[in-house]
Image (cartoon, coloured by chain):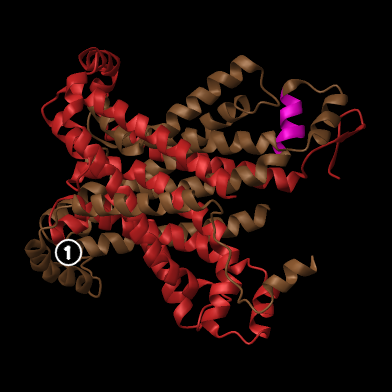
Amino acid sequence: MSAALDARLGQPWRKPPLIKRAWLRWSLAVGAVIYLALAIASIEVNWSRVWEGLDRGAAFIMSFARPDFVSRWGDIWDGMLESVIMTVAASVVGILISIPIGLGAARNIAPLPVYVICRGIVAISRALQEVIVAILLVAIFGFGPLAGFLTLSFATIGFLSKLLAEDIESMDRVQAEAIRATGSSWMQWINYGVQPQVMPRLIGLSMYRLDINFRESAILGLVGAGGIGATLNTAFDRYEFDTAAAILLIIIGTVMALEYLSGIIRAKVQ
Amino acid sequence: MPIATSPSGQKVWQRRTRNQSMIRWAAWLVGTAIFLWCWGQISEATTWFFVWDAPAIAGDILERATPPRWSYMEKLWWPIWDTLNIATLGTIGALFLAVPVAFLAARNTTPSARFVRPIALLIIVATRSINSLIWALLLIAIIGPGVFAGVIAIAIRSIGFCAKLLYEAIEEIDRTQVEAVTATGASPLQVMAYGIVPQILPAFAGIAVFRWDINIRESTVLGLVGAGGIGLQLQASLNVLAWPQVSLILLVILFAVVVSEWVSAKVRGAII
């Protein structure tokens, strides 16, 4: 002990490395450098085009100082209204469907076959991206808010069922068992034993999902699934940056308001 | 405890008092009315003839889309490489930008809670609430289509997410360690390097990998608006209604998403 200490004395302290094995550390570092070099080299940047665009970028940033809400107000209002309608309807339907699927995907209350099916639904819904689902649904159901509504409902199911199922799986067994011991039916058991334990989190998650759905509804219009995205796309295509800035400001404002509101509601229920 | 009296005079347990149940009933009524109105609006904007026809069309598309055109794969390797680069370089760029923002936004490291912190929080909210596709649209209008626009779009979009999680991690650090380093007479930079950074490094690595996983998903569709990656091929195939190619690209995207999720879960498991 003292010999080791004597050897250490007088030598400055050195920070221990993050990865202990030297060969792994070096090969990771070299690999990362090679990858980065290849990746950066494979990106073609047309610097003259970028240079030209900087003026337009500056114009866009300036247009945030004087956004134009007025000249396209009719289009903005219609788009926003459609986005909000899609968000509300899809959140309601998505939450209603995801509650039974969430119950089914919780291993501690669902039998194995139900569990496997529900987990499968969750996995599919989570793996497919909103925009891709929207493209397919637009191809099937035609242009309009119905495709957007179905997309958002579908995405809500994956998100909410998974988190709800995880919450149910980590719940307190004792309370649920106490209800069971009174001779309750299955519905009563869920209603009085499980639901009170997960309700605060379910409400919080639902509010959060409402917020996400609104943000997503802003891009669904790009592929023809209704909402403000189509208006925004047109504004960019026509270089009407002041209108685009107005739309972006409305989106940011709405998201902030929703976040604030969901914060209040979550604080109240928890 | 709320108690109701049954007609025979017996007292019965009730879950809620009468006022509580009236309020709940009214709230449900209003909520249902709002939902029905929204549904009515959607229904009005829908051509129901197409919807009734939808199962036939879905079957038709499915029939055209199978089997996937596997030979198209050789044209997909380069876009897949681009997609990977957009996600990785975008994440790295976002982390460089997010770290200073996070330190400015955290209550215990911000230079001024009244002036600097609100600005940092505004950056976080603004970048987070706008989808990467919209950032890509904007950047394409400014710097032209291509992979570069995609990288920047992913980077900007990720700032808010990374900075928010990071500043929450910074606010939760153990103050005693920072104090101990300060007590040795360390300069502010040394306090940062030896007191704060080691505490948030695991969180930082976890956030980076988590965001990279999300960015892989997002970069697969950036091409739809012209920002490079496999989405360009998807858009091109959709435009010419080449359904076998579309189904192949969707399979590739699905595979990429699953692999990236697996990698990120593994790496996070190894770090934390």
The brown chain is: A
Point out the stretch of residues depicted in magenta: A187-195
- Determine the residue positioned at 25% across, 24% down: B248
x, y percentage for residue A32? 36, 52
Q: Is residue B270 above or below residue B124?
A: above
User: Which residue is label 1 attached to?
Assistant: A241
Q: Can residue B226 be seen here?
A: yes
Q: Is residue B234 magenta?
A: no
x, y percentage for residue A31? 36, 49
Q: Is residue B7 above or below residue B261?
A: above
- Choose top left, top right, bottom left or bottom right for residue B14: top right
**Residue closer to the observer: B125 or B201:** B201
- Determine the residue positioned at 15% across, 23% down: B242
**Residue closer to the observer: B192 or A63:** B192
The red chain is: B
Which amino acid type corresponds to the residue marked 1 in the rendered image? Phe
x, y percentage for residue B263? 46, 39
- Determine the residue positioned at 21% across, 41% down: B224
- Choose top left, top right, bottom left or bottom right for residue A143: top left
Chain letter, disc 1 residue = A
Q: Can residue A75 be seen here?
A: no
- Determine the residue positioned at 30% across, 44% down: B84
Q: Is residue A139 left or right of residue B187?
A: left
